Amino acid sequence: MGDARQGPLTRWGAGRRRERAAREAEFTAFVEATAPKLRRTAYLMCRDWHLAQDLTQTTFARMYASWARIRRVDSLEAYSRRVLMNVVFDERKRRSGSELVVAEPPAGSSHRPDDTAELHVALLRALATLPVRDQAIVVLRHWEDQSVEAVAGILGVSMSVVKTQNARALGRLRALLGEDFART
Amino acid sequence: MDENLRLLFDRALADEPGPPPDDLADRAKAAGAGLRRRRHRLVGAAVATVTAVAALGVATVGAPPDAPPETVPAGFAMLLNPACTSPARDTATDVSVFLTPDITDQQRAALDRALETDPAVQTHRYESREAAHAHLARMFADAPQLVDAVKASDLPASFRVKLSGPYADFVDRVGAMPGIDQIIGHACPKGTDIWTTG
């Protein structure tokens, strides 16, 4: 008798647990599939592997906190970039004041990098002198190969902003890095 | 130049330490669950503060948070889609127009008409307190004690606006209309909004 009454409730409880377990597994799979790439993008934004790891974890934590709602979003990958960039911007805001961006302004300096072995170091340094949103545009466009439209969606700006800022950022990088960078 | 950039980025990433730890997902889950708990507390406290049911709200939901938001709308910011930035101004794509509890039907109708014709508004819809409560119940299905502690009458009604024009112009035109408690802009990614639900 008691069993008969408990039946549906027990089944309901089990169903909920199963659904929960499925959601958890889905999240773990998502993290495993996207973490390596996300961490590299984070690194290019902060130039510090340790911090990149933290930013990546924070991104996934924020997504986990809303996972039940967001798991059906059209493009979770683009969505994760959006959350990452928000995490990066927050981090920058928190640090600004205490520490200004690292790179010395190479503009006009005589020792321009002349072999490509150093050029990638110089590139990251030059990138760091750009406004943070421009850094995001350059990294998403030229490292992640995201389309103009996708970048606009991720950063919540118009496509024309992405195009003009991207062109300006590349111009700035070219000026900082010199001719070697434009060639090759 | 594009390929050159990619090549250089590749090279810059060459010193990558070993792959992310296996337990990254577990750590993110632990931290994410903490965020969720904190958010529940903040929302609970926000509601409690405004509706003067502090004892009920805070006691049911948990320890008092460090800095409870002062208004229900501010508390609602905690409910947001984490991909949205709030408050947002220049980049706002969505707007929540929270209404005062004593707004008259006439004022609401006038506001509805103003939104209908405003050039910066793409779409708008009214969300009653009951609808807001139903949202809350859905979003916090995993925290029934929170949902129970909040009554529909504790929540503000609002207009949910999708913008097609500048936020600042919109606020200039609409902001001073009677019956509005608070306007909050949100910058949300394409295809989602502040209430994106699964």
Image: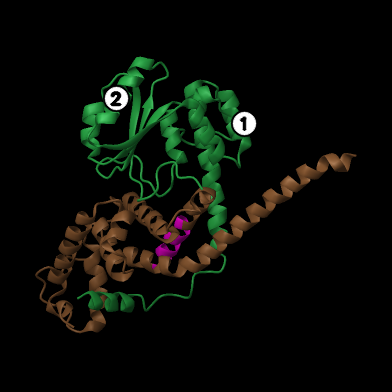
Chain colours: A brown, B green
Nearest the eye: B159 or A87: B159
- Residue B60's disc is 1
Looking at the image, is A56 positioned above or below residue A111?
above
* x 52%, y 67%: residue: A32
Query: Is residue A13 highlighted in magenta?
Result: no
Mark 1: secondary structure: helix
* x 59%, y 28%: residue: B149
In the image: residue A17, left or right of residue A158: right
Chain identifier of the residue bearing label 2 in the image:
B
- Residue A88's disc is none
Dot in front, 2 or 1: 2
Residue bounds of the magenta highlight = A49-59
How packed mark 2 is, by other alpha carbons closer than 10 Å (few <14, some 14-19, many 20 or more), is few
Judge if badges 2 and 1 mark residues of a common chain.
yes
Kindly identify which residue carries mark 2: B113
Chain identifier of the residue bearing label 1 in the image:
B
Rendering coords of residue A122 (x, y %): 23, 73
Where, by quadrant of the figure, is residue A172 drawn?
bottom left
Rendering coords of residue B142 (x, y %): 61, 42
